[in-house]
Image: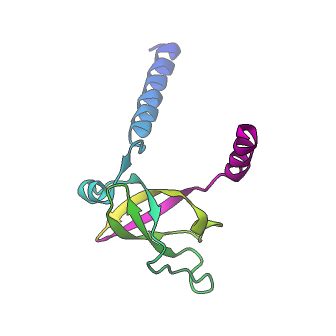
Amino acid sequence: MKKSYLLAILLVIVAVVLFWQTGNATSEYADFARAAETGNRVQLVGTYVKDKPTVYDPLTDPNYFSFYLEDLAGAEREVVLLMGKPQDFEMSESIVLTGRMQNERFIASDIQLKCPSKYKDEEAMIKNLTES
């Protein structure tokens, strides 16, 4: 067999493997019910429930942070984040987690916070000044 044919076959195999891996990436948001149903790794979006307990003791375990989240369907569950508590966590408007359900808890390996814009107050002030 020619070297060019072997190279072409190798490139096709690499392309198929890369396509398969990106196909397994999470791309749509799920709620707690869907995450429990699939058992797979999902992205979950929701809001922090401030009146429920949070657990973070960096001296005992700096990679364990537990809190409660309300998903878009209104269900509340405990979330265990396997990393430290993010800065400005309490000020977040919404939270996107990547992980999977384990029993009644969501075990998250990644978190993204959507915090309020620091420009909202400035925008409102400018709008009020231009309307006056």
Decide whether residue 124 is among the magenta residues. Answer: yes
Instruction: Give whichever of 54, 131 is nearer the camera.
Output: 131
Q: Position of residue 115 (x, y in %)?
A: 61, 56
Above-or-below relation of 119 to 130:
below
Q: Position of residue 59 (x, y in %)?
A: 63, 86
Give the total number of marks visible in the rendering: 0
What are the residue bounds of the magenta stretch? 104-132
Residue, x 28% and y 54% (percent of image)?
34
Above-or-below relation of 25 to 66:
above
Residue, x 39% and y 37% (percent of image)?
23
Query: Extreme front residue here?
Result: 132
Residue 43 vs residue 59: left or right?
A: left
Query: Extreme bottom residue here?
Result: 60
Please identify the quarter of the rendering in which residue 86 is found: bottom right
Above-or-below relation of 13 to 8:
below
Instruction: Give whichever of 58, 123 is nearer the camera.
Output: 123
Instruction: Give whichever of 117, 42 is nearer the camera.
Output: 117
Q: Position of residue 43 (x, y in %)?
A: 42, 52
> Which image quarter is the N terminus in?
top left
Residue, x 42% and y 32% (percent of image)?
19
Q: Position of residue 9 (x, y in %)?
A: 44, 21
> Which image quarter is the C terminus in?
top right
Above-or-below relation of 27 to 95:
above
Instruction: Give whichever of 99, 116 is nearer the camera.
Output: 116
Residue, x 42% and y 59% (percent of image)?
99
Decide whether residue 131 is among the magenta residues. Answer: yes
Q: Colour mode?
A: rainbow
